Image (cartoon, coloured by chain):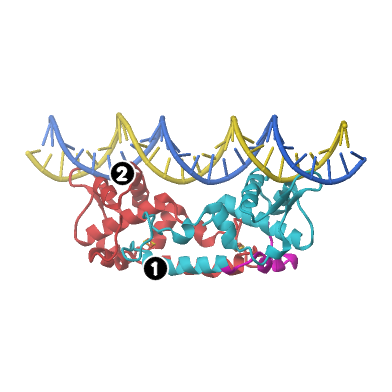
Chain colours: A red, B cyan, C blue, D yellow
DNA sequence: AATATTTCGGACAAATATATCCTTTATTAA
DNA sequence: TTAATAAAGGATATATTTGTCCGAAATATT
């Protein structure tokens, strides 16, 4: 469904979000550890999220990554997925035709579009603050 | 969503199904042409579909690929996707955790599972015969 | 100012997915 | 029986994704 980069990216962002809600800033070492992700690869993904203005980074001692508290309920899963995987999953044809076109649909179009739209709706309406609540009280986990 | 191999495989199978419904057998050259897919790669995918007993192949002159008419409404999109991409898309965790577990869910689990289940339901209930009807009357297309 | 820490950026490496080519095998038709 | 045809299977090539490494730049602490 999502690329590895996107999976790591979402997990990392959620961890950073949780820490930011507590006023803490975290470095890539800790982020990788807590999300069970490869450290150097995670660092790369964090870089792209900074460029996409989803995360804020601070260099030097006591530096790391954080998220502006005010944006915790502005940033959605859609923002993350678009920044890392692009938007093919939302707009692309399920059978890989050059474009999805309901005037000249592929054989799965009518079956597929409603599911794709549900996914789109879910991702674009789910904010970080919604998700970190269950993380904080231990109902959800970022690694096994 | 699906791999290129799976996209090509579904398109190829639908074309073969359409031809089989008319009593025609088709070779890989024609299949690749009509589905706008790379020929040699398509040949490989057709091989795996034959091994998965979804297609039947016949060697030699006037040989090619076909589908038993009786199985046209038994074979589902799920059968194709499982044969080519495996079943991670049905059972795997949306965030890439080792397993999807509703007792210890990842942060997106509760949001994600219903969509994944809708996809599963759609794929497992959609048969080839359902799809080739709209192909034959020109409502749907296999290439642009 | 010097040093330690941490992200940034680029180059590089490995693994996987995508794609091609060529020889062998089976089958049909002449 | 011979020749032609088409899939099977293996080897190889290319592209993309995944992942690592290291020096440079920035910043906080001493
Ligand atoms: S045309 Fe294929 S999903 Fe819309
Ligand atoms: S645990 Fe992640 S989707 Fe179920």
The relative height of residue C24 versus residue B70 in the rendered view (above or below) is above
Is C8 above or below relative to B66?
Answer: above
| Among the 4 quarters of the image, the one containing residue B111 | bottom left
Dot 1: chain letter: B
Label 2 residue SS? helix
- Residue designated by label 2: A39
The quadrant of the picture occupied by the C terminus of chain A is: bottom left
Q: CA distance from mark 2 to mark 1?
A: 28 Å
Which residue shows up at 33% across the image and 48% down it? A37
Report the number of numbered marks.
2
Going 79% across and 57% down the picture, which residue do you hit?
B24
Residue A117 on image: x %, y %: 50, 68
Res. B120 mark: none
Q: Which residue is mark 1?
A: B111
- Residue stretch rendered in magenta on the structure: B125-144
B87 or A37, nearer to the observer = B87
Q: Position of residue C13 (x, y in %)?
A: 41, 31
In this view of the protein, can residue B34 be seen by the observer?
Answer: yes
Find ligand 2 in the image and state its quadrant: bottom left
User: Which residue is found at the position 63% from the left and 57% from the top?
Assistant: B10
Q: Position of residue B55 (x, y in %)?
A: 67, 54
**Marks 2 and 1 share the same chain:** no
User: Dot 2 falls on which chain?
Assistant: A
């Amino acid at each position: 469904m999502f690329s590895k980069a996107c999976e790591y990216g979402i997990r990392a962002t959620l961890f950073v979000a949780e820490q930011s809600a507590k006023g803490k800033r975290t470095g890539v070492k800790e982020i990788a550890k807590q999300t069970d992700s490869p450290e150097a690869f995670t660092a790369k993904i964090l870089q792209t999220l900074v460029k996409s203005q989803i995360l804020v980074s601070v260099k030097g001692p006591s530096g790391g990554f954080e998220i502006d508290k005010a944006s915790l309920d502005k940033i959605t899963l859609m923002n993350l997925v678009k920044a890392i995987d692009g938007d093919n999953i939302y707009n692309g044809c399920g059978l890989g035709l050059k474009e999805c076109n309901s005037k000249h649909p592929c054989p799965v179009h009518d079956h597929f579009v409603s599911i794709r739209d549900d996914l789109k709706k879910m991702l674009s309406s789910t904010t970080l603050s919604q998700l970190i609540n269950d993380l904080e009280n231990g109902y959800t986990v970022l690694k096994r």
